[in-house]
Amino acid sequence: MVVFIIVAYMVIGFFEIIPLIQQREKKKIVLYTMTLFLAFVISLLLGLGIHIPSPATPIERIIQAVVGG
């Protein structure tokens, strides 16, 4: 499973980043690479069976603190 995740992200990254490099879109390359890396890490952790806590509870607490409820 882990090998499949690594290969899939390499293929996706290759086909998506090459056109950005050719168009010299430096900001888009950085943003796309950071987003792809974050998604890769999360997918890899899930593929290894590591539990990732949901961000829903902290987000809900922040909203309640701002709105007041």
Image (cartoon, rainbow, N blue to C red):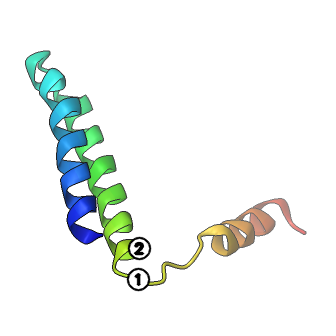
Per the image, the residue denoted by label 1 is: 49
Rendered residue at 17%/48% (across/down): 10
Task: From this view, report whether residue 24 is shown above or below residue 48.
Answer: above
Picture coordinates of residue 6 (x, y %)?
Answer: 21, 60
Q: Is residue 34 left or right of residue 45?
A: left
List x then y, in percent, for residue 11: 19, 42
Please give the label number shown on residue 46.
Answer: 2
Q: Residue at x 30, y 69 (%)?
A: 1
Dot 1 amino acid type: Gly
Question: Counting other residues with Cα less than 10 Å from the Cα at mark 1, is it few (<14), some (14-19), or many (20 or more)?
Answer: few
Question: What residue is rendered at 29% in x and 40% in y?
Answer: 31
Judged from this view, the residue extending furthest toward the bottom is 50
Vertical order, 57 against 5 (above or below): below
**Separation (CA) of disc 2 from disc 1:** 5 Å
The percent coordinates of residue 56 (x first, y second) are 67, 68
Q: Does dot 2 land on a helix, a strand or a loop?
A: helix
Between 52 and 48, the residue placed more toward the observer is: 48
- With 21 as the anchor, is 5 left or right in this view? right
Q: Nearer the viewer, residue 31 or 54?
A: 54
Q: Is residue 55 above or below residue 10?
A: below
Question: Which quadrant of the structure image shows residue 43?
Answer: bottom left
